[in-house]
Image: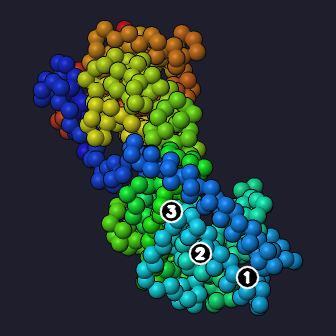
């Protein structure tokens, strides 16, 4: 919609405008399908309901099964440790060459057997579907959905390929030695070059033509509730080699394995799982996916195609959530908002709106200052008006409607971020800020007085008795507003952009509706409070 048509739509809501019916609420920008809410609002939460009968069953079975299974798991780990020690003796923590020869054959066979025994002792019944590809056929396994620490069973079934893991995990007693035995790709959180080094290591191993073990990657990068597949990180797809997708399913009546950001803890899940008679898990190896030439040059394209194939096989949707959404959830909780308020589908928002995590996190602070007093962490028209220090008017409702993308009468954080980026930030260019300042500076003396500020906002919002003293004092350092103060406020509070320029849009629409010869009259460029006074010159007004 053009700026003139947009201004006409706003004018239709201003009392006395004479255009259309009061209360008209057109959509001023198209609501792109790409910005529709995701099919799964929150894939990082799991609420497992356990009935009274089930609780009794868990308690009775737990008396017997829990100590037996815990003892067996501990025993198997102790038995596996010597083999892991043999495999890693005299080897650096970060390997530069693969472990080969008798050490690899003996230890891999023993550890694979003990791995199966450990999961069996936990009560897992594993069903394997499909054919496991060789290292030459597919150097990389991509496993999804990733929903629990029990997903390590895929590593055992696949023959103990290398895994990508934090370097801190290699320092854990007993477990660290077992991890090092599978020749992992270790990631350091303190090394600024860790990401680049990790990708280079994956590329080196994936293109070694079978010299290194296959690599198993959970491309989602964090645990979900298996209701969808979130964004696949491109690391496993950057080498441009064939990959084998691996699907994980847990077809149990009672879910005791899902480990999400909101739900049962590690210890609780272990206890619940150990107290079950058995836990079913299906591991399906899909056909190997070979990248096209285009996908070799664009790993994100390759990752998306593989993700779509896996989602179709699982019968679940895909969303653009990622690990950064989890970080925003934690930040929202720290700001006393519901944790799910921080979910924005970060991958889509950052790509389409050119926002980084720090920028979105800054918006979350602003959002929390508005929504902290509201129920459910959402912003209604009253909180919106209070934050802007303006009364509820037709124009403010129009602005609110632009943020409220699903027309439910409230704004969530995702809508707030999209609204600021799509509707406000483009209007806050240097040129627009200068034009808006000149609009308010009626007498063109380089300063905006409270009277000038009030006059324009009253006309813009259609509220004759509007009190703007609070907003004026927030912008001005003294009795008037300089351009530097106006610019600083406009850049810091982009949500005011539409309000500051609404009257300018109305003037522009009025000018375009005039005959051509009138439009070219020099007086049009003069700074007027009302478009009806365009015949006065600036000098004549000053003389008055």
Question: Of the residues under marks 1 and 3, which one precedes in the sequence?
Answer: 1
Q: Is residue 159 left or right of residue 341?
A: right
Tell which of 263 and 270 is nearer to you: 270
Real-space Cα distance between discs 1 and 3?
Answer: 27 Å
Q: Quadrant of the N terminus?
A: top left
Task: Tell me if mark 2 has few (under 14), some (14-19) or many (20+) residues whose alpha carbon lies within 10 angstroms of its own.
Answer: some
The label shown at residue 146 is: 3
The answer to whether residue 34 shows anywhere in this view is yes
Q: Residue at x 55, y 23 (%)?
A: 485
Q: Give the quadrant of the C terminus.
A: top left
Find residue 307 and report its horizontal and vertical position in percent.
Answer: 42, 69
Give the label, 1 or 2, closer to the camera: 2
Tags 2 and 3 touching, CB below 8 Å: no
Q: Which residue is mark 2?
A: 116
Q: Which numbered tag is attached to residue 107?
A: 1
Say the numbered circle drawn on residue 140: none
Estimate how packed mark 3 is, as few (under 14), some (14 to 19) or many (20 or more) residues with alpha carbons within 10 Å: many
Colouring: rainbow
Query: Mark 2 or mark 3, which is nearer to you?
Result: 2
User: From mark 1 to mark 2, how far is it between C-alphas?
Assistant: 14 Å
Where is residue 173 drawn, in percent x and y?
78, 60
**Element at label 3:** loop
Q: Secondary structure at mark 1?
A: helix
Task: Specify the farthest residue to the right.
Answer: 90
Residue shown at the point (57%, 60%) measured from the top left: 149
Above-or-below relation of 328 to 334: below
Report the residue at 73% width, 82% height from top: 107
């Amino acid at each position: 919609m053009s700026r003139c048509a947009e201004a006409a739509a706003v004018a239709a809501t201003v009392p006395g405008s004479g255009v259309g019916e009061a209360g008209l609420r057109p959509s001023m920008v198209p609501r792109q399908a790409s910005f529709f809410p995701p099919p799964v609002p929150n894939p990082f939460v799991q609420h497992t309901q356990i009935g009274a009968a089930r609780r009794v069953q868990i308690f009775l079975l737990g008396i017997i099964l829990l100590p037996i299974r815990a003892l067996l798991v501990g025993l198997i780990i102790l038995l596996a440790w010597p083999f892991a020690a043999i495999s890693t003796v005299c080897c650096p923590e970060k390997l530069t060459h693969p472990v080969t020869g008798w050490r690899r054959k003996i230890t891999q066979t023993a550890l694979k057997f003990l791995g199966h025994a450990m999961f069996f002792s936990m009560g897992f019944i594993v069903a394997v579907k499909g054919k496991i590809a060789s290292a030459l056929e597919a150097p990389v396994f991509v496993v999804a959905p990733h929903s629990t620490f029990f997903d390590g069973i895929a590593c055992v079934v696949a023959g103990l390929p290398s895994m990508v893991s934090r370097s801190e995990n290699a320092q854990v007693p007993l477990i660290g030695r077992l991890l090092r035995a599978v020749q992992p790709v270790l990631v350091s959180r303190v090394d600024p070059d860790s990401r680049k080094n990790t990708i280079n290591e994956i590329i080196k191993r994936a293109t070694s033509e079978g010299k290194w073990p296959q690599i198993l990657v959970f491309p989602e990068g964090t645990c979900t509730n298996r209701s969808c597949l979130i964004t696949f990180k491109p690391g496993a797809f950057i080498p441009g080699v064939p990959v084998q997708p691996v699907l994980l399913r847990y077809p149990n009546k009672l879910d005791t394995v899902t480990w999400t950001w909101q739900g049962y803890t590690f210890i609780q899940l272990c206890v619940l799982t150990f107290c079950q008679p058995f836990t079913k898990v299906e591991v399906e190896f899909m056909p190997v996916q070979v990248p096209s030439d285009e996908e070799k040059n664009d790993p994100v394209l390759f990752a998306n195609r593989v993700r779509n194939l896996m989602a179709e096989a699982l019968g679940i949707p895909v969303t653009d959530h990622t690990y950064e959404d989890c970080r925003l959830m934690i930040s929202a909780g720290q700001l006393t908002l519901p944790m799910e308020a921080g979910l924005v589908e970060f991958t889509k928002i950052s790509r389409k709106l050119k926002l980084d995590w720090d920028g979105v996190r800054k918006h979350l602070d602003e959002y929390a200052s508005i929504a902290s007093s509201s129920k459910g962490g959402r912003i209604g028209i009253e909180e919106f008006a209070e934050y802007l220090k303006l009364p509820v008017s037709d124009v403010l409702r129009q602005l609110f409607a632009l943020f409220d993308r699903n027309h439910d009468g409230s704004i969530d954080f995702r809508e707030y971020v999209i609204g600021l980026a799509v509707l406000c930030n483009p209007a806050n260019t240097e040129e627009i800020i200068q034009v808006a300042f000149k609009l308010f500076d009626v007498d063109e003396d380089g300063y905006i007085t409270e009277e000038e500020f009030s006059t324009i906002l009253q006309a813009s919002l259609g509220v004759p008795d509007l009190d703007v003293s609070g907003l004026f004092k927030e912008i001005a350092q003294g009795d008037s507003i300089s351009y530097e103060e106006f610019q600083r406020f406009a850049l810091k509070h982009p949500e005011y952009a539409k309000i500051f320029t609404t009257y300018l849009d109305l003037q522009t629409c009025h000018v375009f509706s005039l005959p051509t010869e009138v439009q070219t009259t020099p007086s049009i460029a003069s700074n007027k409070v009302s478009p009806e006074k365009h015949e006065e010159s600036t000098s004549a007004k000053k003389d008055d």
